[in-house]
Amino acid sequence: MSESSCSPLLGSEIKRHQLSRFILITCISLISFFPINILLPSFPALAARFDMPSADVALSISLFTLVFSISQLVAGPLSDKWGRKEVLLGCITLSILGAIGCALSTDYLSFLLFRSVQAMGCGFFVLGHALVEDLFEEQDRARVRLYYMTLSGSFVALSPLIGSWLQTTFDWQGSFYGFALMASGMLIHAFCILPSKSASPHRTQVSIIGTLKDVATNRDFLRYWWIAALVFACYFALISVTPLIFMDSLKLSEYQYALVLMVYGVAYLLGGLAASYLQKRISLSRQINIGLGLLLVAGGLLMLIVGLGAITTITLLIPMLISALAVTLVRPAAISAAMLLFSSSAGTAASAGNSIMFITAAVSSAALAQAGANLLLTIAISFIVFSVWGVVTNARVGR
């Protein structure tokens, strides 16, 4: 066969491999959030099952996120040392065991224990960022990260619709069995496409402790991840308390609540398209500032709605949709800028950054769950304060 006839075949094979890798990375992101958002419509059922108020059930989300963030701090460095595939397969297996344990729990204490096991396994989420650095060229990484984070964010918002169906069809255990099934499919996919010991191609003999020290002392790396943490905390805290707002306060049914978040998911997709357009035309720093400005606008509108007492499903959706656009603009840009600084130790760098992001989100959501009657006002203030904080942090990058 001539060289000219081989080239199209070779190009097709490369594209197929790239698509397969992108699907794996996207699935890593999707399924890591699955146990959080899919469970939201089951809050009333869980509260009834374990005889606890909904606010206490909401704290289980914060516990999951806290353990999840710590597990990432372990999974990333281990993947640099032992290989992405080995750590990924081990974590997925652990998360499956935790999910099945949750479904079989007969009391709230054992439920929380297995949720923690599931969260430990879901630390494989951090490997998505590391695999982007390993498997894609530098000029493609920001675009790949934007696409998969937009898809995952949309899934996070749309997932309660799936959760509502699972709750109606299989009761609260359905989300855990659904997670176990999806994770099993991803386990097989990862086993087939990743080579053994697939650590970073730039892998060096630098110790994990040494890399963590370098990461912790790099101010620009910390600033970029702190910006990502601030906007993600706003997004995650809002999502985690939406059952309290829409189902408990506004008395929406599980299905109506799921539809509200479906609209939010569409906004997330549109935000991804806008971010893709801007990414080709402006710098990452400017894109970050535009997103932070939109978060400020969302906080101001929400404060106005609360002040006027105009709290309805429609009015609340407006600042929610604006905040979704803000997150899609800021988070991929900030993370891409941070990861470029440590491409040679992507696992350790991603684990450190993600731990910052998810610990911030866990603390914020736990605090919001206790805000009581001032929940919406607290969210509005956090949007405003975090957006201003983010702009100031972005201005200090490079100094």
Image: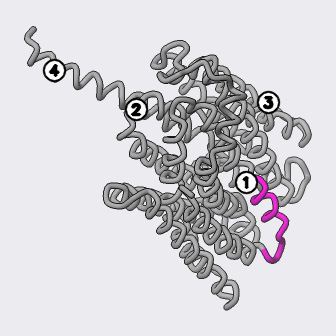
Residue 254 in view, yes or no = no
Secondary structure state at the residue bearing disc 4: helix
Which residue is painted at 69% across and 84% down in the image?
A: 306
- Of the two numbered discs 3 and 1 in the rendering, the one whose residue sits closer to the viewer: 1
Tell me whether the residue at label 3 lies in contact with that at label 2, contact meaning CB atoms closer than 8 angstroms: no
Q: Residues within 10 Å of mark 3 (few under 14, many from 20)?
A: many
- Amino acid on which disc 1 is placed: Thr
Tell me whether the residue at label 3 lies in contact with that at label 4, contact meaning CB atoms closer than 8 angstroms: no
Splitting the image into 4 quarters, where does residue 118 fall?
A: top right
Total marks placed: 4
Read off the magenta span. 362-374
The main secondary structure of the magenta stretch is helix
Upstream in sequence: badge 3 or badge 2: 3
The disc placed on residue 342 is none
Question: In screen coordinates, is 135 left or right of 65?
Answer: left
Residue 388 in view, yes or no = yes
Secondary structure state at the residue bearing disc 1: helix
Tell me whether the residue at label 1 lies in contact with that at label 2, contact meaning CB atoms closer than 8 angstroms: no
Instruction: State the residue position of label 1.
Output: 360
Instruction: State the residue position of label 3.
Output: 101
Q: CA distance from mark 2 to mark 4?
A: 20 Å
Instruction: State the residue position of label 2.
Output: 136
Which residue is painted at 48% across and 53% down in the image?
A: 333
Q: Nearer the viewer, residue 9 or 388?
A: 388
Q: Residues within 10 Å of mark 4 (few under 14, many from 20)?
A: few
- Of the two numbered discs 3 and 4 in the rendering, the one whose residue sits closer to the viewer: 4
- Amino acid on which disc 4 is placed: Ser
Upstream in sequence: badge 1 or badge 2: 2
